[in-house]
Structures are given as C-alpha cells and as structure tokens.
Amino acid sequence: MVDTSPFFLLTEQLLDIGSVSKAVQLPHCGAVNLFVGTVRNRTAERSVLYLDYEAYTPMALAVMQDIAMRARMKWQSIEAIALHHRVGRVYAGDIAVVLAVSSPHRTEIFMATDWIMSEVKSSVPIWKKEVYHDGAVWVSAHA
Amino acid sequence: MTIHLFAVARDIVGSSVYTIDTKQVPCCTVGDVRRILCKEFPELLTLRSFAVAVNQRLADDTVVLTPHDEVAIIPPMSGG
C-alpha cells in the first residue's frame, strides 16, 4: 500500500505536513506552497464520522506523477511537486491530502496548486465513502 | 478474463474481481466488458458514469483486449 517515494505517497499512516514540504524544498527555490485537505465533520447537514478511502494504487500513483508532469509543462517555473494522500479510514478533522509545490518565485504556484488539486479530484483513481451515524455513501457515485 | 472492481462498483458486484468466461461470452473490447457487466449487474447503470482502465490507463470502448491486459472498472472518482 505504501510507495516509498518522498514525492508521491498513498498511505494508511497519518500524514506529516513537514515531510511533504521538505520534499520540495530546494536551495534555489524561494517559495513553497502547501495545500492541506482535511475531513469535514458535516456534509449537507449530516454528521460525518469518518471517510473510508480506497485507491487503485499503481494507477493512482502513475496518474499523480502524470498530473505533476503536466503541471510543470504548464507552469515552467514550478520546480518540484509532492503529493501525499491517505487511504483507509480517516476521521473527521484529520488530514486526507497534502500537496506541496515549489518554485524560485511565488507567482505561479498558487494557480498550479489549485489546478493540481482539481486534477487530483477528477482523475486520480481514489474513492471515498462517507460514513454517518445512520449510513454511508460513496461520494459522487450516483447522479 | 479478470476484471478488477473498486469502491461502489465492487459493492454492486459483491467482489473485487469478476471473471468473464471468454469461452462462453464472445469477448472482447472495452465496450463488450461494459455491456457484459451492465447486463449482469444492472445497478451499475445507476452510477453517474464509469470508466474502464486497461493496464492502468483509461481506455475507450473501442480498445481490443488481450488475455494479459489488466482491466479495471473505475467508478466516479472522489479523491482529495
């Protein structure tokens, strides 16, 4: 379940924001932008206890790397990208995903961060089931 | 031919793998796999959509499968 790359990781362990940030910190980069996604405790008025994340691991890692490569083609000042994502059970309030983007200067990294997260949500084969007191739903599965 | 299933698709089929007996059922393109599964498990049609990955890349319905291909059903993704 665990890939050992410092850049792209799917893990059942708690995520460490510092290690994702350090992975992209380079001597000639003056900017690191971090996005931290946490589990909300409510969805549409229902209390969420936890999420069960599941991944098609080898494809998910390949797509994560492909998204990073495309981001670096779109914004050539981007130097490094690291993306760590939880799998398994993640409780409300816990961190589900950490993305770090580095560049010599900050200008483009905000747009790149937003673009990468949109791509992650739409094209990385990871699924989450929201579990409530009284049921569970695979997010976005049905029309 | 073995089809890998994830998340809501696995729940509908009741197993993380489904085998299509290619001696019994003419097979196969990606579109054939889609039709065979939807016929056997009509609840798949209630999904917003589902994609098919071949060797860990999304493939359209015209792609022809060989016995060594890794085929997976990819229901709507919800990472992040």
Image (cartoon, coloured by chain):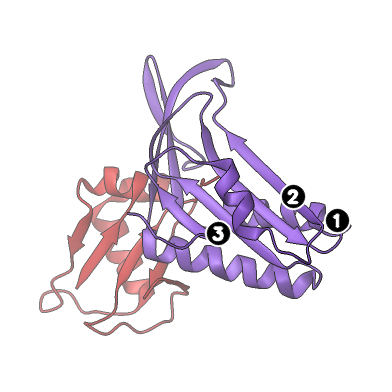
Chain colours: A purple, B red
Q: Is residue A72 above or below residue A23?
A: below
The image position of residue A54, as x and y in percent, is 38, 46
- Quadrant of res A78: bottom right
Name the disc covering residue A106, or none: 1
Observer-nearest residue: A31 or B3?
A31
Mark 3–mark 2 Cα distance, whole angstroms, equals 22 Å
- The disc labelled 3 sits on which kind of residue? Ser
Please give the name of the residue rendered at 23% of the width and 53% of the height, measured from the top-left corner.
Answer: B16
The residue lying at 40 percent from left, 50 percent from top is: B45
Of callouts 2 and 1, the N-terminal one: 2
Check disc 3: other Cα within 10 Å, few if <14, some if 14-19, many if 20+.
some
Discs 3, 2: same chain: yes
Quarter of the image holding residue A122? bottom right
Q: Secondary structure at mark 1?
A: loop
Q: Which residue is mark 3?
A: A123
Between A39 and A127, the one lying in front of the other is A39
* Chain hosting mark 3: A
Which x, y percent locates residue B72? 33, 64
Indicate which disc, 3 or 2, sits on the residue closer to the N terminus.
2
State the SS at label 2: strand
**Element on which disc 3 rests:** helix
Q: Nearer the viewer, residue A112 or A137?
A: A112
- Rendered residue at 47%/68% (across/down): A62
- Please tell me how many numbered marks the rendered image carries: 3
Mark positioned earlier in the residue sequence (1 or 3): 1
Corner quadrant of residue A28:
bottom right
Could you tell whether A115 is left or right of A106 in the image?
left
Q: Position of residue A84 (x, y in %)?
A: 52, 51
Nearer the observer: mark 1 or 3; the answer is 1
